[in-house]
Image (cartoon, rainbow, N blue to C red):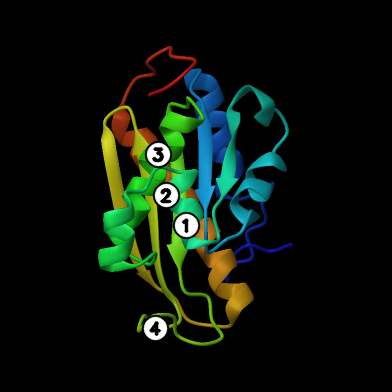
Amino acid sequence: MGLGADGEGPADGPAAGVVHGLATRRETLATVESLTGGLLAAAIVEVAGVSSVYRGGLVVYATELKSRLAGVPQELLAERGPVDGDVAVALAEGGRRRCDADWCLATTGVAGPRPQDGKPVGLVYVAAAGPNGSVVRRLGLGGDRDLIRSATVVQALRLLAERVAAAGAPSGATGGA
């Protein structure tokens, strides 16, 4: 399964680098997915040796589960809806806490085929929460539903790789939040 327009697959693309980097640092990872519906977790667990890094994840496709399982404030969801940068950050931070991980990646957006709640197809937010805080990236992706979801996985993993690199030397931690 190719994950991006550049043809990167899960075992030879950004997932492998992230997993091996976190394993070297003795740090852990979790995921919280809406838009990608488990595709991000699937890409991560295809990497050999991932069991020392990946704690687990949540697929919170339904809006109410974003609050109930990932801890996103209900007021935030009511005010902004599920496709929002602050919601993505709350998903990542909640997943990091719930899964007791050093790092967490979250995805939310509109894959189509139609706009959702006034948000255009291809509007995506990926967020990474880690020991030094959280960051969110807004993406405007083109293509069909499958391409948007696959490109989201690649972009989320790239965001995490950047954040881990920016975090500097390994902390030696084995658990998170």
Q: CA distance from mark 4 to mark 3?
A: 26 Å
Disc 1 to disc 4: CB gap under 8 Å? no
- Within 10 Å of disc 1 (Cα), the crowding (few <14, some 14-19, many 20+) is some
State the SS at label 1: helix
Residue 20 location in percent, x, y?
Answer: 58, 30
Q: CA distance from mark 1 to mark 4?
A: 21 Å
Q: Is residue 37 left or right of residue 1?
A: left
Amino acid type at circle 2 is: Ser
Amino acid type at circle 1 is: Glu
Q: Which mark, residue 64?
A: 1
The answer to which of marks 4 and 3 sits earlier in the sequence is 3
Disc 2 to disc 1: CB gap under 8 Å? yes
Q: Residue at x 57, y 34 (%)?
A: 19
Residue at which label 4 appears: 120
Residue at which label 3 appears: 94
Q: CA distance from mark 2 to mark 3?
A: 9 Å
Residue at which label 2 appears: 67
State the SS at label 3: helix
Q: Nearer the viewer, residue 82 or 48?
A: 82
